[in-house]
Amino acid sequence: MLDKLFSGTTSVLQAGLTGLGQRQRALAENVANADTPHYKRFEVSYEAQLQAAYEGSHAAPLAVTHPGHLSLGPSGVGPAGAGSQGLAQFQPELRRATDSTMRNDGNNVDIDVEMTRLAQTSLTYSAVADLMKRKMTGLKDVIRGS
């Protein structure tokens, strides 16, 4: 019963906060190392992984009518580990951007771009955290009967 209350939207919001938090840490490290020679900035992508995990966690189980059929149900081999495992196994992708250089010292951090991304990430994080707060407030109100 509690699984139904805290699955779906809550799991997606939690995964989004995880990805945004990791992105904020990477951007803060990039800003801190903006003047470090040969430093290569970090990038965090999570949106595509979150979408795949979400779609995998909501895949409808398919009937296996022949021994040669592949199962795409909760224990099968669906996208992102179909079933509830999709969101549970969600991990943002952290990579170092080594394909460019901004300056002669080998550093590729553009402080203006990093500060803009940091502001965007902070606003998005605040919005998602607010959605999570509203979800929890709604559950609390239902429990209290108000």
Image: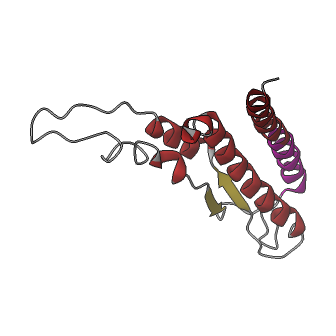
Task: Please say whether residue 133 is one of the residues in the magenta stretch.
Answer: no
Its colouring scheme is: secondary structure
Please report the bounds of the magenta region as a residue range.
110-125
Residue beneath the point at 55% across and 35% down: 4
> Can you say which quadrant of the picture contains the N terminus?
top right
> Can you say which quadrant of the picture contains the C terminus?
top right
Numbered marks: total:
0
Residue 67 vertical placement versus 42 (above, below): above
143 to the left or right of 67: right
Q: Main secondary structure of the magenta part?
A: helix
Task: Please say whether residue 122 is one of the residues in the magenta stretch.
Answer: yes
Q: Position of residue 54 (x, y in %)?
A: 52, 38
Q: Which quadrant holds residue 22?
A: bottom right
Residue beneath the point at 18% across and 35% down: 64
141 to the left or right of 43: right
Q: Position of residue 123 (x, y in %)?
A: 86, 40
85 to the left or right of 61: right
Which of 50/88 is in front? 88
Which of 111/67 is in front? 67
Q: Position of residue 103 (x, y in %)?
A: 82, 65
Residue beneath the point at 61% across and 42% down: 11
Q: Position of residue 95 (x, y in %)?
A: 63, 62
Which of 130/109 is in front? 130
- Residue furthest to the bottom in view is 37
73 to the left or right of 87: left
- Residue furthest to the front in view is 145
- Residue furthest to the left in view is 67
